[in-house]
Image (cartoon, grey):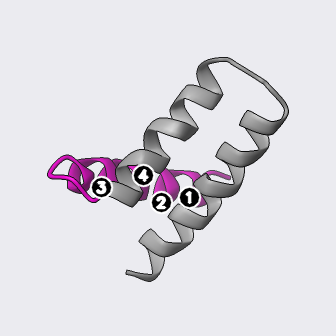
Amino acid sequence: MIVSLSAVALFGVLAFVLLRGRYLGPFSACVLFLFGFFTASTGAAGPVRAMCLALADAARHLT
């Protein structure tokens, strides 16, 4: 639960900044997509969370 709340806060802030700065592109679409899944907690949120955890774990192990 701590990871999902942190992710919601992070993606919420990023979504606000991207919308406020009127930056439109693939990165902003990805941020808004992830923010929607983390806040909605739909049936597809489980695989999206697992993918984000795997990416975070892979990034942590990069040298």
Location of the N terminus by quadrant is: bottom left
How much space separates mark 1 and mark 4, taking CA atoms? 14 Å
Q: Residues within 10 Å of mark 1 (few under 14, many from 20)?
A: few
Q: Secondary structure at mark 2?
A: helix
Magenta stretch in the rendered image? 41-63
Query: Disc count in the image?
Result: 4
Residue 57: which disc?
A: 2
**Callout 1, which amino acid?**
His
Q: Secondary structure at mark 4?
A: helix
Q: Quadrant of residue 25?
A: top right
Residue 61: which disc?
A: 1
Q: Nearer the viewer, mark 2 or mark 4?
A: 4
Q: Which residue is mark 4?
A: 52
Left-right relation of 22 to 37: right
Which residue is outermost to the top?
25
Magenta portion: prevailing SS class: helix
How much space separates mark 3 and mark 2, taking CA atoms? 10 Å
Q: Secondary structure at mark 1?
A: loop
How much space separates mark 1 and mark 2, taking CA atoms? 6 Å
**Cβ–Cβ below 8 Å for labels 1 and 4?**
no
The tag earlier along the polypeptide, 3 or 2, is: 3
Residue 50: which disc?
A: 3
**Cβ–Cβ below 8 Å for labels 4 and 3?**
yes
